[in-house]
Amino acid sequence: MQRHGQPPHQQGDVTRVHTSEQAKTEPAQPPGRRESEPIRPPEQGESKPIRPSEPTRPLGREDGGPVRTVVAAVAGGAAAVFQAVARLRHGRPLHPDGLVLDAALALHGASRPRGAAFLDEPADLRGVARLSRAAGLPPPLPDILGLALRWRTSAAPDGGTGEVTAELLLATTGHTLLGRRLLRPATRWSPGMYGSLLPYAAGGGHVLLGVVARWPGPPAGLAALRRASEGGPLRFDLVVASPLGPWERFGTLTLTGPARSDAAEPTRFDPVRNPIPGLPPTGLLQWARGPIYGASERVPDHDALP
């Protein structure tokens, strides 16, 4: 990971994502666009727009008592269901097929400190991304679209020499105060909003993470996505928001081909075991993800099953 100084044209950046449903979608940001210009997540249908590490602290420990007991029971039941579906599918219970691309994250920092290096400090990060359809329904049927990210980053807040693997899972959501908490089926890869749904702890508070796809997206099929990646980089805005605050850009995400299938050797992600340093998943629902991921990972893929 290479850290760098803040580029001159991004100093003093204060960029927020507007939530007006009527505002016209902007096209992909050209090289000369000023960071201070407002942006908003475009709507579907608009024409343009590695070694696992443990969580930094146990999830949900602050939420004890009967509520946690109920959530644990629900998580256990969901894990059993996911494991059964994985066995029936001979592989992933969700997002069974996808494409993997190279990922570059260019961070310039949010306009105000958020209490996490990933959100506050300039950095250039390299990794991989996987785009997929959650239910595996054939196009043109709508489906929840997923974007999984993995990269190597400094384990120390001060940018020390040690590195860890960090992962982030996103899915198509809305972008309003309510919509950012709801999954949203989509028919195109872009334009649109991919959000974390669940919160992360940062600076004594909570934040939601996301990316805004702004390239002229093809229909949400893997063949169309492969063709789009052959035509050039796929660009996204990296955004952050407090649970009740506006979205703000803190960097960009660029995906480049060649796009490759991971059907033979599935690429697995687990943001609970591989959290972003300084941004641990928080809350009971985040804590409940662990058993579900573990159950699906214990099922062999494809021909490895009896």
Image: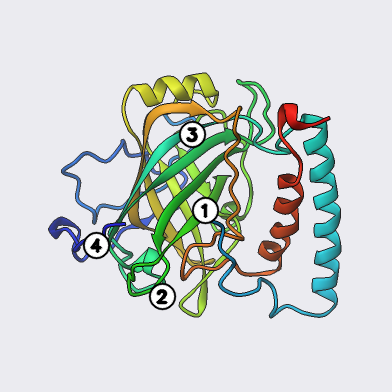
Q: Are marks 2 and 1 in contact (CB under 8 Å)?
A: no
Q: Is residue 193 left or right of residue 257?
A: right
Is 146 above or below relative to 111?
A: above
Is 84 above or below relative to 238?
A: above
Query: SS of the residue at dot 2?
Result: loop
Q: Which residue is mark 2?
A: 115
Front-lying residue, 135 or 214: 135
Residue 250 image-quadrant placement:
bottom left
Amino acid type for the residue under numbered disc 3: Val
Residue 239 image-quadrant placement:
bottom left
Amino acid type for the residue under numbered disc 2: Gly
Q: Residue 68 appears at what percent x and percent y?
A: 80, 72
Gap in Å between the C-alphas at discs 2 and 1? 18 Å
> Local crowd at mark 3 within 10 Å, few (<14), some, or many (≥20)?
many
**Which sits earlier in the primary sequence, circle 1 or circle 3?**
3
In the image, which disc is placed on residue 100? Answer: 3
Q: Residue 76 appears at what percent x and percent y?
A: 84, 58
Amino acid type for the residue under numbered disc 1: Leu
- The reply to whether residue 145 is visible in this rendering is yes
> Local crowd at mark 2 within 10 Å, few (<14), some, or many (≥20)?
some
Circle 4 or circle 2, nearest the eye: 2
Amino acid type for the residue under numbered disc 4: Asp
Q: Which residue is mark 1?
A: 168
Circle 2 or circle 1, nearest the eye: 1
Circle 4 or circle 3, nearest the eye: 3
Query: SS of the residue at dot 3?
Result: strand
**Which sits earlier in the primary sequence, circle 2 or circle 1?**
2
Query: SS of the residue at dot 4?
Result: loop
Q: Which residue is mark 4?
A: 13
Gap in Å between the C-alphas at discs 4 and 2? 17 Å
Q: Is residue 101 left or right of residue 295?
A: left
In the image, which disc is placed on residue 282? Answer: none
